[in-house]
Amino acid sequence: MIPPELTPAQVAYTYANEADLLNVVLFGKTARQWKNENPTVKGNMRDVATLNQLLVLANLESYNAVLISQGKNQKERMELLRQLAVQQLQTLEMISLNTLPKLEDGINKMQEK
């Protein structure tokens, strides 16, 4: 994905740009924007993200790699990634630990068979 003639600084910049692309897709802002808005918070936006956001972020990273290998440009990738992020976050918000069956119930049903 990254041509070998890039310097280490350019490679780091490329990865930082991709990380910021994902930050904008999921959080609506770059890491720098978040840090400027939250100067007293230790760490970065990913450190204070919810478990659902981190799960979606991991999925976005994988999907972004697929989109890059398909030759999608940045605008196309952002649109597709945003659609995925919204869909997954909505799905995860609908799922609650309170609505999942208890492990014991599942074990009992399996033993009944």
Image (tube, rainbow, N blue to C red):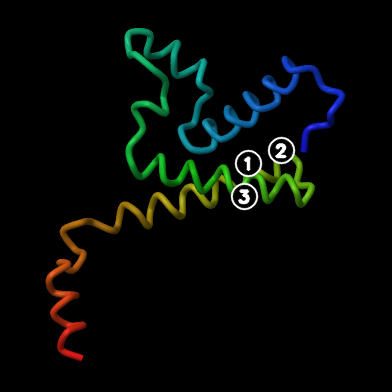
Res 9 → quadrant: top right
Instruction: Return the disc, 2 or 3, that comes first in the chain's sequence.
Output: 2
Res 18 → quadrant: top right
Q: In which quadrant will I find the N terminus?
A: top right
Kindly identify the amino acid type of the residue bearing the numbered disc 2.
Gln
Kindly identify the amino acid type of the residue bearing the numbered disc 1.
Met
Q: Is residue 4 left or right of residue 66?
A: right
Give the residue number, with chain letter if any, for mark 3: 80
Label 2 CA crowd tier, 10 Å (few <14, some 14–19, many 20+): some
Distance from Cα at disc 2 to Cα at disc 3: 10 Å
Label 3 CA crowd tier, 10 Å (few <14, some 14–19, many 20+): some
Q: Is residue 37 above or below residue 56?
A: above
Q: Is residue 24 above or below residue 87?
A: above
Label 3 with label 1: CB-CB less than 8 Å:
yes
Which x, y percent locates residue 86?
A: 46, 49
Kindly identify the amino acid type of the residue bearing the numbered disc 3.
Leu
Q: Residue at x 41, y 45 (%)?
A: 55
Label 2 with label 1: CB-CB less than 8 Å:
yes
Give the residue number, with chain letter if any, for mark 2: 74
Which x, y percent locates residue 46?
A: 42, 28
Res 12 → quadrant: top right
Give the residue number, with chain letter if any, for mark 1: 78
Q: Residue at x 20, y 56 (%)?
A: 97
